[in-house]
Image (spheres, rainbow, N blue to C red):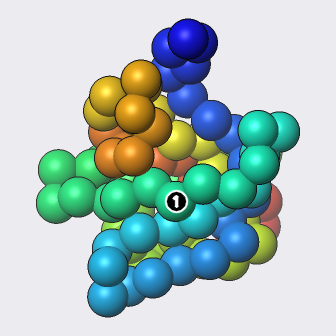
Amino acid sequence: MSLVQTSIGEIVEVDPRQQTITIADSAGRHTVKISSDTRIWLDRTKLKQMNLTGSFADLQVGRRVEVKYLAPERRDVAEWVKVEIAQS
């Protein structure tokens, strides 16, 4: 079993009620829980600016994200999510 630490893909669904996002990546679609301990970062490297702390509201359909899993073998809860921000 592969213990992949992170996934990079596009958000295809957001469920604020359940605090989950569904991402589509090379392995397909999967849903990830965003817990109160999940750190969310706004990745602004394409803008040549420093990353900022984000929130669940920044997790929007169509945005590209990198997700690091709390338990890589289960890939169900995010330790952190980095959201790509391409424009200001």
List the single residue furthest toward the front: 1
Query: Is disc 1 placed on a helix, strand or loop?
Result: strand
Q: Nearer the viewer, residue 87 or 31?
A: 31
Query: How many numbered marks, from 0 up?
Result: 1
In-image side of 37 versus 57 (left or right): left
Q: Nearer the viewer, residue 85 or 23?
A: 23
In-image side of 18 versus 21 (left or right): left
Residue plotted at (35% across, 59% down): 33
**Residue 51 shows in the view:** no
Give residue 39's position: percent from left, percent from top. Answer: 30, 48
| Residue that carries the numbered disc 1 in the rendered image | 31
Q: Residues within 10 Å of mark 1 (few under 14, many from 20)?
A: some
Is residue 23 placed above or below 49 in the rendered structure? below
Give residue 81's position: percent from left, percent from top. Answer: 46, 47
Residue 34 picture quarter: bottom left
Q: Nearer the viewer, residue 73 or 37?
A: 73
Q: Which image quadrant: the C terminus?
A: bottom right
Q: Nearer the viewer, residue 36 or 25?
A: 25
Q: Which image quadrant: the N terminus?
A: top right
Is residue 9 placed above or below 16 in the rendered structure? above
Instruction: Please name the amino acid that badge 1 sits on.
Output: Thr
